[in-house]
Image (tube, rainbow, N blue to C red):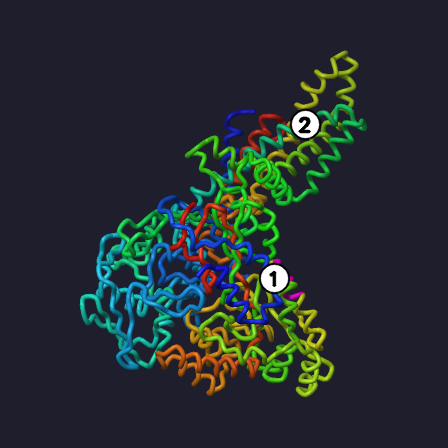
Amino acid sequence: MSQSRKGSIIVRRLLQAVPVIVLSTFIVFGLLKLVPGDVAVTLAGDNASDARIAEIRHIYGLDRPFLVQYGSWLWKAVHGDLSSSLVSSESVLSSIERCLPHTMLIVVLAMLLALAIGIPLGIAAASRPGSWTDGFVMTIASLGVAIPNFWLGMLMVAFFSLDLNWLPATGATPISEDFWDAIRHAILPACALAAGGVAEVARQLRSSLVEILSSQQVRTLHAKGLRPSSILWRHGLKNVSVNLLTVISLLFNRMLAATVVVEAVFAIPGMGNLIVNGAIHRDFPVVQGVVFTMVLIVVALNLLTDVLYSILDPRIS
Amino acid sequence: MTNSNRMAGMLSRREIMALAGGAALAGMTGLPAFAQEAAKKGGVLKVAAPANPSSLDPATGGAGSDHSILWTMYDTLVEWDYTTLKPKPGLARWSYPDSSTMVLDITQGIKFHDGTDLDAEAVKFNLDRNRQDQRSNVKADLTSVASVEVTGPLQVTLKLKNPDTALPAILSDRAGMMVSPTNIKALGNDTNRKPVGAGPWKFVSWADNASIVVTRNETYWRPGRPYLDGIEFAIIPELATALRSVIAGENEMAFSLPARLKPVIDRAKNLQVITAPTLYCIQLYFNYARAPLDNVKVRQAINFAIDREAFVKATMGGLGEPATMTLPSSHWAYDKSVSTLYPHDPAKAKKLLTEAGFKDGVDLTIGSYTDQDSVRRSEVLQAQLAAAGIRLKFTRGTIAEISAQFFATEKKFDVLLSAWTGRPDPSMTYALGFDKGAYYNAGREADPELVKLIQQSRESEDLTERAKVFAKIQRFVMENGLSAPIAFQYELDALSKKALGYKPNLLGKPKFENMHLG
């Protein structure tokens, strides 16, 4: 495949991303406005009268038409200004700068764990389908999918933090401040998040690997006299790599979403925490800022996946 | 007085507390005697706080959970007694030379954290800002003030439009928190993110939903105070997680915990558990401007149908006080004679319903919230009222959503199951909840007699006189069944063995001024 074709994929994808970003922030903005209750109630405080709430709406420009409010947010966002929280007046950009590293650390660590454990399990299961190992791995995988991550998180805290006192139960340290302490804080939440991922990776890898290994191509390789291990590693895995890539990219997105719950359980001041608090108070600049960032990340990730696809399998364009 | 003394005192006074039974007693005997230990200076206290503040500017913020954090940085003109909430001098002493004048005499030599003098000019600046600034959320508290005049270097005189003896209590709340005028002139409303007050600790940093740090004010006006070098708040809204952080030793204190976590605290051997009464009143709000709750007999029937003692046992693990009015028994304005109006009597409730024309019972729509505790409360209540033929149809949602639907313009539901968080002065509670046009009076209607009584409650300066007026108000509200108070929630806090000197107060919002580390 030529360099220019790859370039054109990237340009096309980036152009497609623009409407995705506008549409998703618009939908979220609309949802926030549709749900009853608004930020003016929070801003007006405990003693507020109807008149005071109306006055607050006016002061903060919340009484302007919906499209005008969205437009003014978008206009600022396009110019790199994500506004400030209406409630606490912290700049949304600085909130995100502080929260994003915490979330990314957990998700990346969880991803690494899911792959490091899930891939060997999947291979072990696929290389002897129907065996005792296979049954064991698939049972573990089913459990992993079924167990809610917040529950697992609480169990792990009870055991590893409160009983054994090995790892911190709550909080997070910025990775820029103290690398190892940041990792220590991220291990338990990452494990809780990874459990479902391990299961997902193992199951998907097993099923596609089983399919490949029972294909005619592999029978030919056997007939050619290749050693089974070489068939598995060189031909089998190479063929499932595209499937695996799809799983990884979907899993990454799913893990980003799951941080909302896991961060609450571990009191991690990350993006999930930020958007939950924003949504509770209908603090739309915060919610919009988080959605905007998340959409950017997901779009970038999908783009990267597409580029990797075309490298792994030249037939995909 | 130590906490255990105070609770024991309250128990002996109030036979009704016997019902709280085992759980409450067990909690009390576990309380350490704080007063005997000599306070040691130094150390940083780590606290799990349940909510991100709405603002660190007292004038523009709005959430009741802000106070615990605001009090670390801001001192108030007036303070109160922890147990009864009787007002007492803070930064200033007050007097009423006549019924339309209030004089504040400021203590000499107090400075804000930035070195600005806390003098008459500074107090006038603050009060005028609180009264007039467009973004001020305490304007409504100060409507009785016509003007604020500087009448001496350390004296301001408030001219009042009408007699208002609730002002001392109001000045112990947000309206009396003094902010450095220099800081406001420099930053405007951005003082929210860089607050400067005159409190025992100075502001260091605030990261939204993550942490707030304050450090010792070396020039604090009270000699020998504060004990702590600083406080680090970790903001943890998930309260079970907050408690875990204390069990794991990552924080030394978690406060405002729900009663269902009490067994968890008891199981952890390294913790102190604190329980104490608060003004926080779980209650039913009625929209009595329309049928069927415009009929006083239906409202009375609901009050008779509620088994408050069982409610406290079933939903609060005994960590509460049955509420027979909107003030708890230890409050200075509590009137005992009102407390016997509504014994649990389903038969009487049925009879009242029949008299009101609801022979086959009555169907009521009711709003409530989605959290675990609210759901449990609503289930218990539903069963209790069903026994008297009152059928509740619940709609659940978030606090913001459901309470706006009930109180604001939509006027959904006949009843709202919610809570009243309490106010420093009882007149605020009655004015906000029952006055004509008040926001927390969903129907906006009020009997002229009640309106007059609420006004009267602010006329005398003498607390005994005021208590008499409040007794009349309480009787009026309860006899007319304008709401159904159910139970006062106890404050529940978990502290590590190192965190000493903590005293709960009736507002249920912790102050850290007496705390020190062992």
The residue most toward the top is A225
In-image side of B505 versus B105 (left or right): right
**Residue flagged by tag 2: what amino acid is it?**
Val
Q: Chain of mark 1?
A: B
Bounds of the magenta span?
B372-379
The answer to which image quadrant residue B294 occupies is bottom right
Amino acid tagged 1: Met
Residue appearing at x 64%, y 37% in the figure = A195
Of all chains, the one bearing label 2 is A
User: In the image shown, does B440 or A154 lie closer to the viewer?
Assistant: A154
The tag on residue B316 is: 1
Q: Is residue B200 above or below residue A204?
A: below
Residue B173 image offset from top left, x and y in percent: 38, 65
- The image quarter in which residue B142 lies: bottom left
Q: Residue at x 58, y 47 (%)?
A: A261
Secondary structure beneath label 1: helix
| Vertical relation: A210 (above or below) A91 | above
Residue B375 falls inside the magenta stretch: yes
**In this figure, which residue is indicated by the disc labeled 2?**
A240
Q: Picture coordinates of residue B157 (x, y %)?
A: 24, 73
Number of residues whose C-alpha sits closer than 10 Å to that of mark 2, classed few (under 14), some (14–19) or many (20 or more): some
Picture residue at 51% right of the left edge, 73% below the top: B326
* Quarter of the figure that contains the C terminus of chain B: top left
Task: Please state which of residues A151 and B425 is positioned toward the viewer in this rendering.
Answer: B425
**Viewer can see residue A76:** no
Left or right: residue A104 compared with residue A201: left
